[in-house]
Image (tube, rainbow, N blue to C red):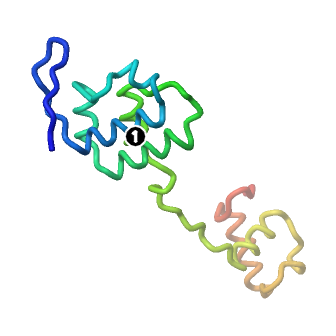
Amino acid sequence: MTTSVANSGEKSTEINDRALGIWLELIDLFGNGFVTANGKRPAGRWLRCINEMTDEQVRRGLRTLEYEDDSDIPPSVKKFRRVCTALHQMDVPKLEAPAYTLQDAQMDAFNAGVPRDLIPGKTMDELHQLELKARHGGFRGLEQ
């Protein structure tokens, strides 16, 4: 269902059920302040903004406004678009940190100046190789 609404000086704008439903959600969140600032029905920039976004973007934006935004002030169309299209924490893939291996621990111990005989798991020959690498700039944080 669509409704035709005449705006001040503008041609009639088609309002679909989806846009009207989102508008009612915004009115529910912000009450009369939203109606006073933006009207009883979406029009113009608001209507374009709503129609350009996906349902998921709108859902996330409404959730953000309801639970994360401390302001009781109704959003402008710019703020609504920004909140709806912002990259959310759940959208960012979690990066796994590389495993900290025994070799990393041995290298860190060597770099920190731990005596060679206290570094576990290394033979004297391997420790000598570490020392040579360190002298030739193979490890960060060691002076040559």
Left or right, 108 with respect to 118, comes to left
Say few, some or many: other residues with alpha carbon within 10 Å of mark 1 (under 14 / 14 to 19 / 20 or more).
few
Quadrant containing the C terminus is bottom right
Image quarter of residue 69? top right
Q: Residue pushed farthest top?
A: 9
Which residue is rendered at x = 27% and y = 34% of the image? 49
Residue under label 1: 25
Front-most of 24 and 60? 24
Which residue is rendered at x = 23% and y = 43% of the image? 17
Left or right, 18 with respect to 30, comes to left
Left or right, 73 with respect to 103, comes to left
Residue type, numbered disc 1: Glu
- Counting the numbered discs, the total is 1
In the rendered image, the vertical position of residue 27 relative to residue 63, given as above or below: above
In the rendered image, the vertical position of residue 81 relative to residue 141, given as above or below: above
Which residue is rendered at x = 79% and y = 69% of the image? 110
Q: Where is residue 124 in the image (x, y as percent from the top left)?
A: 80, 85
Left or right, 29 with respect to 2, comes to right
Front-most of 55 and 124? 55
Front-most of 5 and 133? 5
Q: Where is residue 98 in the image (x, y as percent from the top left)?
A: 60, 70
Image quarter of residue 86? top left
Assign a secondary structure to mark 1: helix
Q: Position of residue 7 (x, y in %)?
A: 19, 18
Quadrant containing the N terminus is top left
Which residue is rendered at x = 48% and y = 46% of the image? 63
